Amino acid sequence: MSTSAVLRSEWIKVKSLRGSVGSLVAVFVATVAITVLVFATVGRAEADNADAEPLFDAFYAFNFGQVAAISFGATAVSSEYVNGALRVSLAAVPRRGLFFGAKTAVLGAAALLVGLVTSFTTFLGGQAFLGDYAIGLGHPGAVRACFGGGVYLALMALFAAGLAAVLRSGVAVLSVLIPFTLIVPFVLGDMAGGAAQFLPDRAGQQILHEDPSGMLGPWTGLGVTAVWAGAALAAGWWAVRRRDA
């Protein structure tokens, strides 16, 4: 089977899985909806705060959107381990490396497209409610943050996809990554100084700051997240190649 045919088959799988499609749609809907709700109600009051960081605050809802991105990556891969689906997939595509590469390529492309649309819509939609406090794409770092934010969401989806191939369970991945991204960084931030800045979410979100603090810059922080995602995908590739279906 050719690479293009495998890519098409993996895209059909993603489209036909209700959980995957729902999670992908939720990346956009949850992020934009929460942004509109927050900025329409308390946006101007928060913008007037002396400690406000206009650019980073514009992406507040990414804390929720990344959960949906993680769910998308985990669900799309873990579905292969339900009711023997992986055996059928490998019967159709015996080259396991091609199978896993095509799956992650499709997941990554879908997550990147939705992530970019979500990122730009979130930024522009939130600013529409701020009146005189609004910033535009001409604000220093704004285009970088919008583009990098979309890449960040895609990397988090791929990180979850790699772990799902290792753990073979979407529930297990969510049980690990949701606390890992929402709780652990704050605990480490208090207990271990700057260690938390190298965790995938904290590092990747450096791209959303106008003037990032700490050791990591905007692109190096995103690079750290890419390393986490790459390591997870490498582990997933090894698991798919070495383990019995």
Image (cartoon, rainbow, N blue to C red):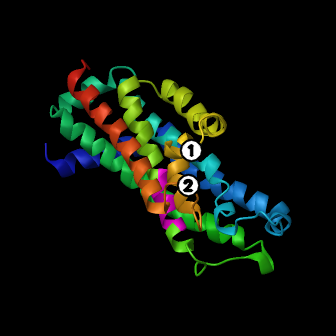
Query: Of the numbered discs in the image, which one, if any, rests on residue 194?
Result: 1
Q: Residue furthest front?
A: 193
At which x and y percent is residue 15? 42, 46
In the depicted structure, whether residue 35 falls above or below residue 245: below
Q: Is residue 125 left or right of residue 225?
A: right
Q: Which residues are magenta?
A: 145-153
Identify which residue is drawn at 77% across, 71% down: 129
Identify which residue is drawn at 44% across, 61% down: 219
Residue 103 picture quarter: top left
Q: Residues within 10 Å of mark 2 (few under 14, many from 20)?
A: few
152 drawn magenta:
yes
Identify which residue is drawn at 36% across, 40% down: 13
Which of 97/186 is in front? 186
At which x and y percent is residue 73? 44, 40
Identify which residue is drawn at 70% across, 68% down: 54
In the depicted structure, whether residue 84 falls above or below residue 210: above
Residue 181 picture quarter: top right
Element at label 2: loop
At which x and y percent is residue 62? 61, 53
Q: Amino acid at mark 1?
A: Gly
In the depicted structure, whether residue 93 falls above or below residue 28: above
Query: Of the numbered discs in the image, which one, if any, rests on residue 214?
Result: 2
Q: Earlier in the sequence, mark 2 or mark 1?
A: 1
Quadrant of the frame with the C terminus: top left
Q: Residues within 10 Å of mark 1 (few under 14, many from 20)?
A: few
Q: Is residue 215 left or right of residue 1?
A: right
Dominant SS of magenta comes to: helix
Element at label 1: loop
Q: Amino acid at mark 2?
A: Gly
Quadrant of the frame with the N terminus: top left
76 drawn magenta:
no
- Label pair 2/1, CB-CB below 8 angstroms: yes
